[in-house]
Image: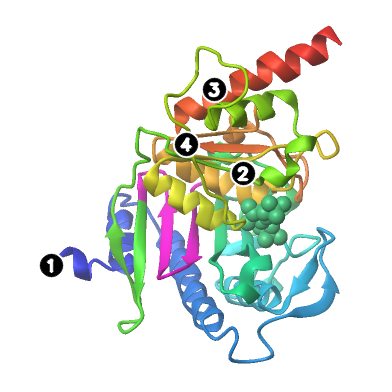
């Protein structure tokens, strides 16, 4: 019974009590993110009913991708709400070329926020699950000033919070502030997120692999051999499985990640020979998910090092991404080392 009424607001307030010196700014910022998620959820649920929600805006974003109307809506809403919160000094979004600051009277807050306002948006018009992803750093530039690029160029390990909202069969918000991973399901009638998944830990057994297999011919040998092992085909080695893992790929990272987090699995978006850094972005997609999965007992890697140890050099940099069960992430690193990096060294 108690858990039914354990709202995200209460959870955030209790977290705050752990830090007597806290000013409440972080709690307020998180509350603004929760509010934004609820409004986006309302709009996502109307997709198909109103013409001005589905389809494209006609613009191309900084990633070179066509912008969907809901992408634009979610981005504008996050920017608008957070900009005037007074708690951020700047924001960066997958949709915007440069960092975004509010007017001078509200752009000196303690935090910077990185956003993928609507991930997996190519799925919107087909009613497939999509998500919003956020990550928060404390600023490193002096307080009282507007935020700067260097506030964003910090390793993921220094994040103070990250999370996502999955607009799925129900809407769930999953976040960590470095003390466990907690999931809150939206109760639409109460209009609030209720704690439904406290202290999520990824199961020990890795049952699922998630990758877009249409790119197989462009994979490096290490990735190809690892995926063959997941399917129990190809050359056998000491890591051979008794039974194949299940293959599940929605093409919406938040949904693929969430399922693997609950059921046990590994998600792969490798680099290819043509695109060595893959598709997913370090600041908006890889870092927040890596922070979450590590807190849940898993791991995330670019194939060589932990995602969270990468020092970003630009806002929109991409990175190969392997995340999920720790043993499996270590194993794919070994395959990459053995078949790709050694090959490169030997020439
Ligand atoms: P987006 O941020 O433009 O929506 O792109 C990211 C999405 C991820 O959700 C998903 O994992 C990936 O793109 C799917 O890409 P692909 O179609 O190449 O498999
Ligand atoms: Mg995305």
Dot 2 and dot 4 residues touching (CB under 8 Å)? no
Looking at the figure, which quarter contains the C terminus? top right
Residue 39 location in percent, x, y?
Answer: 51, 80
Query: What residue is shown at x 62% (from left), y 56% (from top)?
Result: 251
| 171 magenta-colored | yes
Residue pointed to by mark 4? 245
Residue pointed to by mark 2? 211
Closer to the chain start, of discs 2 and 4, is 2
Q: Is residue 184 visible?
A: yes
Q: Which mark is residue 1?
A: 1
Indicate if the residue with disc 3 has its beta carbon within 8 Å of ligand 1.
Answer: no
Decide which of 241, 279 is in the foreground and name it: 241
* C-alpha separation, residue under disc 3 versus residue under disc 4: 15 Å
Stretch of the chain drawn in magenta: 160-181
Closer to the chain start, of discs 1 and 4, is 1
Residue pointed to by mark 3? 331
* C-alpha separation, residue under disc 3 versus residue under disc 2: 16 Å
Query: What residue is shown at x 29% (from left), y 62% (from top)?
Result: 195
- Crowd tier of the residue under label 4, counting other residues whose Cα lies within 10 Å: few below 14, some 14–19, many 20 or above: some
């Amino acid at each position: 019974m108690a858990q039914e009424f354990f709202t995200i607001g209460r959870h955030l307030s209790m977290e705050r009590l752990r830090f007597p010196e806290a000013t409440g700014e972080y709690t307020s910022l998180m509350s603004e993110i929760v509010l934004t998620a609820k409004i986006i959820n309302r709009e996502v649920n109307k997709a198909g009913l109103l013409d001005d929600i589905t389809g494209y805006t006609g613009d191309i974003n900084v990633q070179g991708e066509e912008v969907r109307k809901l992408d634009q809506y979610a981005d504008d809403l996050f920017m608008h709400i957070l900009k005037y919160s007074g708690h951020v000094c700047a924001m960066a979004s997958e949709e915007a070329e440069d960092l975004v600051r509010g007017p001078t009277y509200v752009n000196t807050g303690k935090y910077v926020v990185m956003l993928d306002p609507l991930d997996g948006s190519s799925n919107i018009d087909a009613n497939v699950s999509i998500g919003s992803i956020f990550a928060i750093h404390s600023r490193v530039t002096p307080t009282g000033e507007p935020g700067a690029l260097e506030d964003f160029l910090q390793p993921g390990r220094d994040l103070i919070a990250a999370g996502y909202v999955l607009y799925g069969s129900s809407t769930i918000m999953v976040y960590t502030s470095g003390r466990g991973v907690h999931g809150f399901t939206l109760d639409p009638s109460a209009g609030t997120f209720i704690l439904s998944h406290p202290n999520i830990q990824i199961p020990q057994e890795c049952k699922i692999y998630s990758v877009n297999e249409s790119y197989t011919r462009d994979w490096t040998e290490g990735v190809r051999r690892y995926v063959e092992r997941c399917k129990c085909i190809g050359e056998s080695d000491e890591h051979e499985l008794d039974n194949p893992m299940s293959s599940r790929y929605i093409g919406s990272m938040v949904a693929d990640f969430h399922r693997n987090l609950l059921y046990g699995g590994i998600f792969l978006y490798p680099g290819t020979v043509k695109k060595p850094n893959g598709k997913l972005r370090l600041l908006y997609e890889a870092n927040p998910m890596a922070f979450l999965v590590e807190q849940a007992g898993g791991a995330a890697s670019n194939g060589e090092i932990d995602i969270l140890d990468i020092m970003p050099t630009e806002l929109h940099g991409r990175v190969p991404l392997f995340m999920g069960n720790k043993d499996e992430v270590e194993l794919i690193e070994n395959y990459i080392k053995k078949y790709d990096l050694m090959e490169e060294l030997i020439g």
